[in-house]
């Protein structure tokens, strides 16, 4: 009975998708698995945050947020733009790129160890536990960020089911380790290392399980150059996601960062969910010609943003009850910050959708220019606003940045609706 219903729904989705000009059945199936992994990820993230809120001090949670921000920001040296360029190559059948990209990223990631050791040594004299935790994190840094390319391999093969299963495994292992260490009042270095240690061990295991998916040694030679360009774009994303937290940790009492992390965490989870859903369309997008792609984007953009905006309105109304229920009245001061910060989501949605369009038509130079402007704008806004207006400075700086970025995306999306590619270059990626 279940399988008959499943086939019926799948057939209806295929027919409906043909009417609207895209593979709805494909998005439903893969969207389900991506959504499942994100729901588990959000649940695990909330569980970790609740553990900090209920069983630890604001100072401890502030230190955890600060170190996660520093640790992730240093990942820019691992050439994060490889995620998109390698995904594009594998989706086109160039499996030979995968092992070379892993080696290339690992070599670059080795630079992270001395960088984190130096940062940890500096903080050791100001806050011994924080400094020690940063130095310990340097030991696993190369493996933490390099071997997670297994997810890109499976996405390129359109195997979103296995991606989701392995992501769930990694999330559960690392989150349970952190919650246990918090519950038993472990020191901060032990708490942080339990998270990155569980994450890294799972990455190593899954990497060797998935490498059998490679079917050929074919290689295209633009992946490295493209990955370097796209890494500049990733720098802006990292700055937007983490520079505010780093600056709050530097300029304001560390307890302020705990409040800010609670306030922005819900928006961050929603953005990550939508970003992951959008990633399911990448392999399909990279197979389309420009005319077909622009038509689909035109149909889905306004409807998607409108739906997201309505959902955000509902969340703004319920967020006070949600924060008090999860984190107790200890974090009541995070409520109004969270409500305002949620306004970012519709603008971020525009950026996430149109990003795939610009990648598909090979407008990396345009993306690079826009994101270079974004880096400078973000840094200036945060550096001026946070010391003066504290948490409100961080909130409104983020909102202004997203409004400007999404406006530029829409303007140039219309401008590049009939792009011309270099002579001899295909319209397919």
Image (spheres, grey):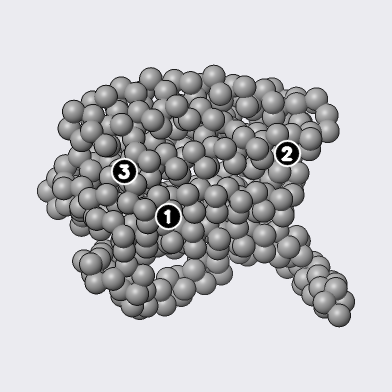
Figure check: 125 above or below 324: above
Question: Where residue 138 appears, x then y in whole percent?
Answer: 41, 28
Mark 1 lies on residue: 179
Secondary element at tag 2: helix
Mark 3 lies on residue: 187
- Return the mark for residue 26: none
Question: Where residue 201 appears, x then y in whole percent?
Answer: 57, 37
Secondary element at tag 1: helix
Within 10 angstroms of label 2, few (less than 14), some, or many (20 or more) residues?
Answer: some
From this viewpoint, is residue 364 visible?
A: no
- In-image side of 233 versus 357 (left or right): left
At horizontal 58% and vertical 48% (from top left) the residue drawn is 170
At horizontal 31% and vertical 60% (from top left) the residue drawn is 55
Reading the chain from its start, which is encountered first: label 2 or label 3?
3
Quarter where residue 24 is shown: bottom right
Nearer to the camera, 23 or 294: 23
At horizontal 60% and vertical 58% (from top left) the residue drawn is 37
């Amino acid at each position: 009975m279940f399988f008959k219903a499943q086939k019926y729904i799948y057939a209806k989705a295929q027919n409906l998708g043909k009417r609207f000009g895209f593979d709805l059945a494909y998005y439903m199936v893969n969207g389900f698995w991506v959504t499942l992994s994100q729901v588990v990820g959000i649940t695990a993230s909330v569980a970790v945050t609740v553990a900090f809120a209920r069983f630890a001090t604001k100072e401890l949670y502030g230190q955890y947020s600060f170190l996660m921000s520093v640790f992730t920001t240093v990942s820019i040296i691992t050439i994060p733009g490889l995620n998109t360029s390698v995904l594009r190559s594998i989706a086109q059948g160039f499996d030979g790129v995968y092992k070379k990209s892993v080696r290339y990223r690992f070599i670059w990631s080795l630079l992270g160890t001395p960088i984190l050791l130096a940062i940890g040594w500096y903080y050791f004299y100001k806050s011994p536990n924080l400094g020690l935790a940063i130095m310990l994190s340097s030991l696993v840094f190369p493996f933490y960020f390099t071997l997670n390319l297994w997810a890109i391999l499976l996405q390129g093969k359109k195997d979103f089911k296995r991606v989701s299963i392995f992501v769930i495994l990694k999330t559960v292992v690392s989150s349970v380790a952190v919650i246990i260490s918090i519950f038993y009042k472990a020191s901060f270095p032990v708490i942080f290392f339990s998270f990155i240690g569980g994450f890294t061990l799972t990455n190593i295991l899954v990497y060797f399980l998935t490498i059998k998916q490679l079917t050929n040694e074919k290689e295209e030679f633009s992946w490295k150059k493209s990955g370097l360009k796209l890494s500049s774009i990733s720098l802006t994303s990292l700055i937007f996601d983490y520079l505010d937290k780093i600056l709050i940790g530097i300029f304001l009492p560390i307890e302020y960062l705990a409040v800010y992390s609670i306030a922005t965490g819900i928006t961050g989870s929603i953005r990550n969910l939508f970003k992951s859903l959008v990633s399911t369309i990448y392999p399909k997008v990279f197979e389309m010609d420009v005319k077909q792609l622009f038509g689909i984007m035109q149909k889905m953009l306004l409807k998607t943003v409108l739906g997201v905006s309505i959902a955000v309105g509902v969340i703004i109304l319920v967020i006070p009850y949600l924060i008090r229920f999860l984190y107790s009245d200890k974090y009541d001061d995070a409520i109004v910050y969270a409500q305002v910060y949620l306004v970012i989501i519709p603008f971020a949605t525009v950026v996430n959708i149109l990003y795939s369009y610009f990648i598909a038509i090979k407008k990396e130079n345009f993306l690079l220019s826009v994101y270079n402007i974004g880096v400078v704008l973000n840094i200036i806004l945060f550096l001026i606003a946070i010391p003066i207006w504290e948490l409100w400075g961080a909130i409104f700086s983020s909102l202004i940045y997203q409004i400007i970025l999404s406006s530029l995306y829409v303007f140039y999306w219309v401008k590049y609706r009939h792009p011309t590619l270099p002579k001899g270059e295909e319209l397919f990626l």
